[in-house]
Image (spheres, rainbow, N blue to C red):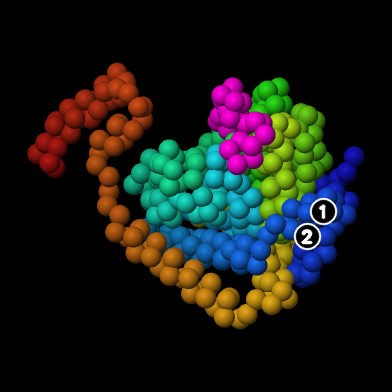
Amino acid sequence: MASVNDTQNFTVRMLAADGTFAPSPAAEKYLPVLDGLTDDDHQQFYRDMVVTRTLDVEATNLQRQGQLALWPPSHGQEAAQVGSARASRPQDTIFPSYREHAVALIRGVDPLGILALYRGVTLGGWDPTDPANGNFRLYTLVLGAQALHATGYAMGTTFRGEAATGDPQTDKATMVYFGDGSTSEGDVNESMIFAASYQTPQVFFLQNNQWAISVPVERQSRTPLFQRAAGFGLDSVHVDGNDVLASYAVSRQHLENARGGHGPQFIEAETYRVGAHTTSDDPTKYRTADELDSWVARDPIARFGTWLRAQGAPDSFFGEVDAEAKDIASDARRRCLELTNPDRDQMFDFVYSDDHPLIVEQAEWLDAYEESMEGGAEQ
């Protein structure tokens, strides 16, 4: 059995850490997928990653300045997210965890919605039924729960005949994101059982960022995590998650497999969480500076930028992307600071779609409590 650290023989990698194009043996069968990409596509990948990281830094600053209650950084995981998100089709439905910021932006979610969620002025952040939000479901802070949601949804697309009809332009796939820590949760394992049983048109996308808060991945599994999925009967693959081309190629192929009737797929993208688990975490308490430095040296943006320059991308392109990213982040900051506190009744109005007697009772109790205070509700 392969060890967690012995990944060279089965990892799909297109770009070496130094940015040179050097496909691994496992990448050979995915090379044709890259043939459909243009220079514009490549530049869009880079733009997506830079914009996401710049927003990530801005959001972290906002939290440190007391403007957000919490922020989960995605620094270091941009290639895994951008490659997989760009590989999806508009009709696909995406179920995120809580740090898929790049995926949200690519699918059309306004970054203000993400900031509002972590500012605590909304229960959701965006309307997942609005076509403008690209079939991107709400962030899920209950670890692993989104895997069950995604599998149930994928089962529904099968029952409705919305997949495996032979038309890749309309056939639907479902993709769910989660972390290495969630693979130890019952919800994720149960969802894979149902997915395998019902052969759902679904991709499980694991971002293995090496740490489940302070628990290292080797404490969770003595074998590579994608091999767990194989044990459930899922077609599974291991990819270098800091290589955006590999992430795209693998995701594109396995999404096509899923929507084409070949059953659920599982992708383990090995990457690294450079920042803290959230802004309430101190990663220096449990990981070493040497480990951090070794992963920073494999930075996904720097790697892809090196390759783009070798392909002839001019310095002006990189300058334009940096300027655009700063403008987007500055605009998000300005709008975030303009957010107002929600009306009190929203905490009751958006729990259930229909009236619920318990919610009505709680709202009446709060009304009575506020009226009992000196000066009444106005106080």
Q: Does dot 1 land on a helix, a strand or a loop?
A: helix
The structure residue drawn at horizontal position 77% and vertical position 39%, both measured from the top left corner, is: 236
Query: Contact, CB < 8 Å: mark 2 with mark 1?
Result: yes
Q: Position of residue 72 (x, y in %)?
A: 52, 52
Work out whether 291 lies above or below 126.
below
Asked if the stretch drawn in magenta spans residue 165, the answer is yes
The N terminus lies in quadrant: top right
Q: Is residue 354 left or right of residue 17?
A: left
Quadrant hosting residue 178: top right
- The residue that label 2 is drawn on is 14
Whether 24 is drawn above or below 322: the answer is above
x 82%, y 53%: residue: 27
* Residue 102 drawn at (x, y percent): 55, 55
Mark-to-mark CA distance, 2 and 1: 7 Å
- Looking at the picture, which amino acid does disc 2 mark? Met
Tell me where residue 138 appears, x and y as whole percent.
47, 41
Q: Is residue 190 above or below residue 184?
A: above
Dividing the picture into quadrants, the one containing residue 62 is bottom left
Region of the chain picked out in magenta, as a range = 149-171
- The answer to whether one can see residue 211 in this image is no
* Label of residue 27 in the image: 1
Q: Earlier along the polypeptide chain: callout 2 or callout 1?
A: 2
